[in-house]
Image (cartoon, helix red, strand yellow):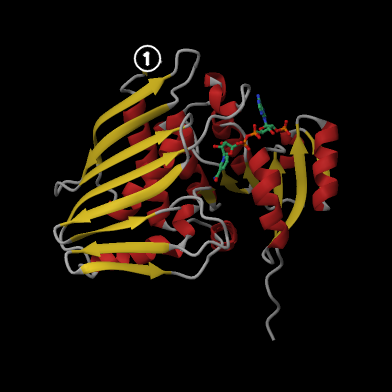
Amino acid sequence: MVAPPSPLRVGVLGCADIARRRMLPAMAASEGIEIAAVASRDADRAARTAREFGCLAVHGYAELLRLDEVDAVYVPLPAALHARWVEAALRADKHVLAEKPLTTERAGTADLLALADARGLALMENVMFVHHPQHAAVRELLADGAIGTLHGFQSAFTVPRRPAGDVRLDPDLGGGALWDTGVYPLRAALHLLGPDLELVAALRGSGPQDRVDTGGAALLSTPAGVFAQVVYGLDHAYRSSYELVGSEGRITLDRAFTPPAGHRPVIRVERASGTEEIVLEPHDQVAATLTAFVSAARTGGVPRDAVADCLRQAALLESALLKGVRPLTP
Ligand SMILES: NC(=O)c1ccc[n+]([C@@H]2O[C@H](COP(=O)([O-])OP(=O)(O)OC[C@H]3O[C@@H](n4cnc5c(N)ncnc54)[C@H](OP(=O)(O)O)[C@@H]3O)[C@@H](O)[C@H]2O)c1
């Protein structure tokens, strides 16, 4: 009998909220992963988190990258620090699962993906929703002509305001709604309409006391003229959905981006003949993302289409960023 491969030994750079609340518990539950170490700028915080997850506590990110007993690292740092620490991790020969956005510059994202490729390492951006099969089910409906010829896509990812001091509200740490929330509907547009989407127009807005953009919208088009409208924001009521409009009907999906593991997705298909609700089995997209990362690390790389989408997303985000920010009147 062939022995199962030994688990991927993962170290975590920073005791971030998303790491403690979501990713570390999912890693602890994953058969393919062993949590090897947790690093923090603060030795006590590292010790507390390490105790909770039964791993080594490390004071400082560079110290963790020196450990031979770490095969891969998870990088949940503020967005502006991703580029520096992802590069350091790759140069230390670690596979990397990095929080979104992978970097805050298209060129930086391209450089890191090329570096990972050259070193035979897996570098994956932690966009988890694409690992949920509800989107594959939507793609199948489109391919089967369920709503006729596709003409349009609309999507929103908006979340309520975080407390003052949150990393998302600090421009020096790569804060702002575009990087934090715009990633989701833009990536969904790429996932469903394909990589040839071009940005047509974009608006970003900032509240009177804010130093970052707190919301925005973008209009995109495929070469064939399928239009996508996306809305995002971090000072908004919660919304996480998309809709596809065709010549003969429309498909809507709620809880599109962050469905809890136990959520039963409902894909709504409306046509002149009536409305159908397709209910799918629950799926844990966090666990699925970790499984995909372990598989990428074992095979020495992330699938080509995921790399291409990550790069294209970075280019679209940068184009939207160049449109500037307008003040929002209160
Ligand atoms: N994929 C998803 O579903 C998802 C969800 C939420 C967030 N995220 C992403 O995860 C990342 C972290 O978000 P979060 O909400 O978890 O943030 P957070 O709680 O503020 O954590 C960021 C961590 O970065 C470290 N850090 C290093 N330098 C820092 C600095 N100058 N200021 C603040 N923190 C610093 C800190 O760890 P130590 O002090 O321990 O070193 C801190 O705990 C962001 O990129 C965000 O976009 C992704």
Element type at marker 1? loop
Residue 191 visible within the image: yes
> Left of 239 or right of it: where is 69?
right
Q: Where residue 128 appears, x then y in whole percent?
A: 51, 52
> Which residue lies at the image location 41% right of the left edge and 36% below the top edge?
182
Is 326 located above or below residue 183 in the figure? above
Q: Quadrant of residue 207?
A: top left
> Left of 62 or right of it: where is 300?
left
Q: In which quarter of the image is residue 291?
A: bottom right
Task: Count the numbered circles shown.
Answer: 1
> Left of 112 or right of it: where is 182?
left
Q: Where residue 120 appears, x then y in whole percent?
A: 53, 53
Q: Which of 75 and 268 is in front in this view?
A: 268
> Which residue lies at the image location 42% right of the left edge and 31% below the top edge?
178
Sort mark 1 into few (<14), some (14-19) or many (20+) by Cα contacts within 10 Å: few
Q: Nearer the viewer, residue 83 or 253?
A: 253
Q: Where residue 26 appears, x then y in whole percent?
A: 67, 57
Residue 68 visible within the image: no
Q: Where residue 319 appears, x then y in whole percent?
A: 31, 30
> Which residue lies at the image location 24% right of the left edge and 47% below the top edge?
196
The outermost residue toward the bottom is: 1
* Residue at the spot of label 1: 329
> Which residue lies at the image location 18% right of the left edge and 57% below the top edge?
246
Q: Which of 62 and 263 is in front in this view?
A: 263
What amino acid type is highlighted by mark number 1? Thr
Which quarter of the image is occupied by the N terminus? Answer: bottom right
Rendered-image quarter of ligand 1 = top right
